[in-house]
Amino acid sequence: MNRFLVNALTLSMMTVLGCGAAQAQTLRLAMNSDIRSLDPGVNRDDRSDAVVLHMVEGLVAYGEKGEVKPLLAQKVDVSADGLTYTFTLREGVKFHNGEPLTAADVLWSWNRDMDPKTQWRCLPEFDGSGLTKVTKVSAPDPHTVVMELEKPSGMFLATLARTDCGGTAVLNKASVNAQGEFVSPVGTGPYQLGEWKRGQYVTLTKFAGYQPLSGPRDGYTGGKNALADEVRFVIIPDQATVKAALFSGDLDMAEVTETDLPEIKAHDKLKVSTAPSATMNVLMFQTRDPLLKDKRMRQAIAAAIDVKQLVATTSNGFGVPNNSIISVASNYYGPSEQKGFTYDPQKAATLLQEAGYRGQPLTIIANRRSMVPSYDLAIITQAMLQAVGINAQVEVMEWGTQLERYQSGRYQSMSFTYSARFDPALSFEQATGNKDKESRKVWEDPVAIEMLGQALKEGDVAKRQSIFDQLHERFIDQVPMIVMYNGLDIVALNEKVEGYDAWIGQKPRLWGVSVKP
């Protein structure tokens, strides 16, 4: 982008950024796109989750390394048969409107989520459509919640904690109006809603009545004290403008790409926090498409892509190629998962001939959002596929439109980034399932679905590893999508920012973070 245009854009955003001495206690963070809603787990994407999870909390949450720990619950007791979960609530927790948290609030929030009219993303995870069915939820006293399952589930608590489920947030009834329509989240988190100015920014303000757990920050648990008076998520789609604002000091922090990393590190007023991520950059296929339903066609595409070169180019050499759904940062990423696709153009040509390919078009949907390699990945893939005779085309869409197409399954192929999941079973679950029940699923192999069900119920590490190894081998053979590489959580920080740490979840956690005057 032209340097003068960048300067003009940066100057035009001075008001949005909240620059100046009066904003000394405001922590300003860039986001590459606006949020979709403030309703936890409803009409959401990864950016929406990142903002909302500063305001709401659930009974349990993920710790720093992906383990599930109590949050609003003081403790969780599980019956010997694995069917009954008893949550004892912490005392002294208050909502943003000052009302105390009770079991009745948990029950109300749960019933709202489970009402199909709410359109909660994770309803199928608990109503029996998927692998778990919650048959009854009760509140025998103000400090106790009991959830009963139809059958044991080793992933029940992990699913309750999922960030795309809104952390299964407990809300106050004031979150909805008299007609039951959602207004804004009245939660128990360290920050509460200030203002959402669509397309410009979302501000959160410190909740003075927040009751943190003891100890240091621990994922979404632990000490979560708000140190900044205000947090401002500024929507800046253009990465050049983000960098200009970082360099000038008009932004305090921003997620940046591997490509930006050398330039950021060379700046004397900036520092960097990095951590391996469980996000997945993928090329997914609609396996019911007339062209792509033939496994040989998908295998040909995989053989035509030089993954090492693609990853090196799109990540400026910082990415690590990985064809497994299991993240390279996971303890379950072993020798089996390291075996992926082999670049072999001749094999690709042979498979295309066997599949009877006659030049039919293959459309790859992508978006140009900053911070994700969607467009670059699609363009490089297109060139590699064209080199072996595949009529590949790239169609660029606005992110919201692409997300809708993903959710509905209306695509041939798509360059997409999956948000992080902490457990490999949940990573597989993102893509695996019956498309008749959930159109967003990519891999609907019945054997894989059955194996995933076993992994979701199994607690033994060695047995789970064996299942994951078998799933990976089957995944590589069937090629419902091609995982290219996991992301890195790379955050550029003004030297005045203290207390921020990148992490595997690749979402900002702004409690415990401050800005020196």
Image: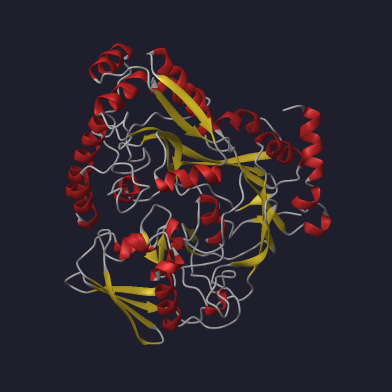
Residue furthest bottom in the image = 141
Q: Position of residue 299 (x, y in %)?
A: 28, 25
Q: Nearer the viewer, residue 338 or 305?
A: 305
Q: Describe residue 441's horizontal placement relative to residue 513 as left or right.
A: left
Residue 263 visible, this angle: yes
Q: Nearer the viewer, residue 399 or 507?
A: 399
Q: Position of residue 153 (x, y in %)?
A: 23, 62
Q: Describe residue 476's horizontal placement relative to residue 202 as left or right.
A: left
**In what quadrant of the picture does the N terminus appear?**
top right
Q: Describe residue 137's horizontal placement relative to residue 184 as left or right.
A: left
Image height check: is 468 above or below 354? below
Instruction: Name the residue: 63% across, 44% down.
Output: 254
Instruction: Name the residue: 56% across, 69% down.
Output: 185
Residue 317 visible, this angle: no
Q: Position of residue 49 (x, y in %)?
A: 51, 56
Instruction: Name the residue: 48% across, 28% down.
Output: 378
Answer with the quarter of the image where residue 244 lies: top right
Q: Describe residue 457's horizontal placement relative to residue 371 as left or right.
A: left
Colour setting: secondary structure
Instruction: Name the residue: 51% across, 65% down.
Output: 223
**Labels in figure, total:** 0
Answer with the quarter of the image where residue 457 lies: bottom left
Image height check: is 374 above or below 493? above
